Image (cartoon, grey):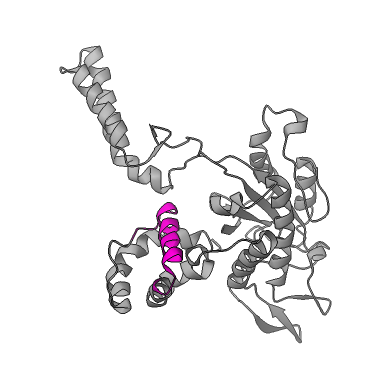
Amino acid sequence: MYITITPQKLGNNFSQGSADFVRYLEKENEGLEPAQMEHFFNQYDNGISQDEVVKEIDANTAKLKKAEPKFYSITVSPSKYELNRLRNSNEDLKRYTRELMKDYVASFNREINGRPITIDDIKYYAKIEHRRTFKGTDRQIKENQPYATKILTLKNEIRKIESGTLQGSILQREKEINRLEREAPHQQEGRRIVQGMPKAGNQSHVHIIVSRKDASNTFSLSPGSKHKASEVEMHGKNVKRGFDRDQFFEKAEKTFDRTFAYQRNFAETYMARKDFIKNPRTYFASLLKLSTAEKGLAFKLMRETGLPMVPGIPTSQAQLALKMFNRLRKGVEVAIKSSSIGI
């Protein structure tokens, strides 16, 4: 499960309205009949129009400054193993999203009028998407890039030969291009993976727009708070503040597992990915204590999610952690960022 929470920006500035983002989320509905379209939903309603989403989010920004986020985007991306556990992808994802937002609310250390905030105190809209394309930041694109660069150079040379500005064999260059296409490390359905190519398989995921202000447009609720749980004196009163990100990500996993009877492997957990960066010795010690079957699945998951594989396991756990830490850290930082807030 990969969950990201980001404040919406246009360049270096926070978005002053939600229309562009909502329009972007409508891209999969282009060309579809009304019955085939995916619509927005919230905690209680389905079939919400994009116009209503924009109206409600943009009207809920009282006293927020230009330099403050007006709304946050939460992206929920279940793994293929988690998606395979769902019986009805759309309905199950809606049900999970509604439970997830209860976990979101519970992770705030805030009170409204002396009581803890509830799901009815936030304003959010969610939308399910079923397609993803490879982006320039994807590992597959980056690792295929040397091949792509060579192929582009060869194609440019062929055009020059055809125009008479360069001498050489077109056939030889075409053979070299074919070889590079075959040998590129990342392929999908027999083709080199390139930027913009649709990803194969079930790619269902959820986008959530959540207002920075509470539903009454009075209180600011920021998941980007740098405070987990603390109190500060304001206007002579002690005020609770903070959002516990670790708690939210852990609750999100447990809610999924409980809702769909999913058996989560160690390598799939948020805390394991976090330990890999923060406490590598703890990570490897936990990994080595797994049963043979669980350890095998953990390595399979690491490989599939882009984490470099451990070529050999030394007997000493400390030796393993020290030996592999520098080599693996760069690769896993991409994964851990998928479970953190970018501010």
Tell me if residue 64 comes above or below residue 142 in the rendering.
below
At horizontal 61% and vertical 61% (from top left) the residue drawn is: 262
Where is 268 relative to 170, above or below?
A: below
**Residue ranking furthest to the left:** 167
The boundaries of the magenta stretch are 288-309
The residue positioned 80% from the left and 65% from the top of the image is 121
Residue 290 drawn at (x, y percent): 44, 71
Please name whichever residue, 310 or 332, is drawn nearer the observer in this view of the structure: 310
Question: Is residue 1 left or right of 243 when viewed as pictured?
Answer: left
Is there any visible trace of residue 289 in the rendered image?
Answer: yes
Position above or below: 236 against 96? below
Query: Main SS type for the magenta part?
Result: helix
Q: In which quarter of the image is residue 7?
A: bottom right
* Identity of the residue drawn at 73% across and 51% down: 94
**What is the quadrant of the C terminus in the image?**
bottom right
**Quarter of the image where the N terminus is located:** bottom right
